[in-house]
Image (spheres, rainbow, N blue to C red):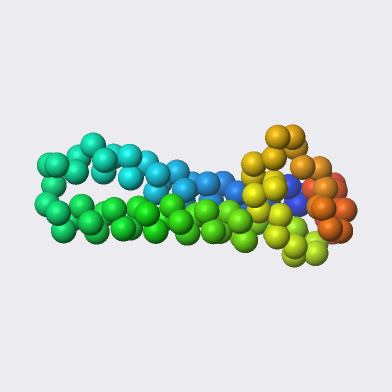
Amino acid sequence: MMIPRDIINRRKKIYLTLVAVGFSAMAILAFIEKYMPHALFNALLYSSLSLLIVGNILMYIGIRCPKCDVIIGYAIVFSAEKVVQCPRCRINFDESIL
């Protein structure tokens, strides 16, 4: 039985992984910049920066309510407390859906 929180958490994990990989690659590039060719550094920098930006955009617009499809993105990812229901349709995220 699938609950809406499972759907939201699956998307959140994917998008946070994109952000983490992009950020980690940028941190590693900061330390090895002087040891690699400039063209390779630029290619890796732009790809890691694009991963970071795409992950953030997807975190904002990609996490949606399973019922009403409203964007709940950053509200659910960075909230201080556990978000229990959708702010628009008031579906409980911990109840099973049919």
- The picture places residue 79, in percent across and down from the top left corner, at 69, 40
Q: Is residue 17 visible?
A: yes
- The picture places residue 67, in percent across and down from the top left corner, at 80, 62
- The picture places residue 25, in percent across and down from the top left corner, at 33, 45
- The picture places residue 89, in percent across and down from the top left corner, at 86, 58
**Residue located farthest toward the bottom when viewing the structure as drawn:** 69
Judge left or right: residue 77 versus residue 30: right
Count of number-bearing discs: 0
Judge left or right: residue 17 versus residue 82: left
In what quadrant of the picture does the C terminus appear? bottom right
**Looking at the picture, does residue 32 appear above or below residue 75?**
above
Q: Residue at x 12, y 42 (%)?
A: 35
**Looking at the picture, does residue 81 appear above or below residue 18?**
above
Q: Residue at x 47, y 59 (%)?
A: 54
Q: Residue at x 75, y 58 (%)?
A: 65
Q: Is residue 96 visible?
A: no
Closer-to-camera residue (1/13): 13
Q: Residue at x 54, y 59 (%)?
A: 57
Judge left or right: residue 79 versus residue 28: right
Closer-to-camera residue (8/98): 8
